[in-house]
Amino acid sequence: MKMNYLIITFILLFPIQATSWGFQPHRNINRLAIYTLPPPLFGFFRKHIDYITQQAVNPDQRRYIVEEEEARHYIDA
């Protein structure tokens, strides 16, 4: 539920960036989502925040490398 509010807030505050969705918004959303986790999970994910942020775009990068992946990447808005 908190994640939905985070995404909506992000889109409302940055409408120009929201129209040009790319790798950086994926990284930002993953990074910000960590701060919404409950305390038991937050500690672990906070330690690995840089790795999670960088790996957030792997599915999108794979889409451009593997020909069959585009058909599986169906949640583009």
Image (cartoon, rainbow, N blue to C red):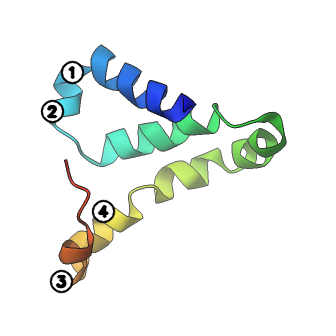
Q: Are marks 1 and 4 in contact (CB under 8 Å)?
A: no
Disc 3 residue type (three-letter): Glu
Few, some or many residues within 10 Å of mark 2 (<14, 14–19, 20+): few
Could you say whether the residue bearing mark 2 is in a helix, strand or loop? helix
Task: Quickly name the residue at label 1.
Answer: 15
Q: What residue is at 30 percent from the left and 25 percent from the top?
A: 11
In this figure, which residue is indicated by the disc labeled 3?
Answer: 67
Q: Position of residue 29 (x, y in %)?
A: 45, 38
What amino acid is at disc 4?
Asp
Is mark 1 in CB contact (under 8 Å) with mark 2?
A: yes
In the figure, 73 relative to 55: above or below? below
Mark earlier in primary sequence (1, 4) = 1
Counting residues from the start of the chain, the first of labels 3 and 1 encountered is: 1
In-front residue for pair 8/64: 8
Secondary element type, mark 1: helix
Q: Is residue 43 left or right of residue 25?
A: right
C-beta proximity under 8 Å, tags 3 and 1: no
Disc 4 designates what residue? 60
Foreground residue, 24 or 69? 69
- Which residue is label 2 attached to? 19
User: Gap between marks 2 and 4, in whole Å?
Assistant: 17 Å
Q: Residue at x 53, y 39 (%)?
A: 31
Q: From what the image shows, is residue 64 above or below residue 49?
A: below
> Does dot 3 land on a helix, a strand or a loop?
loop
Which residue sits at x=36%, y=66%?
A: 59
The image shows residue 61 at horizontal and vertical percentages of 30, 66
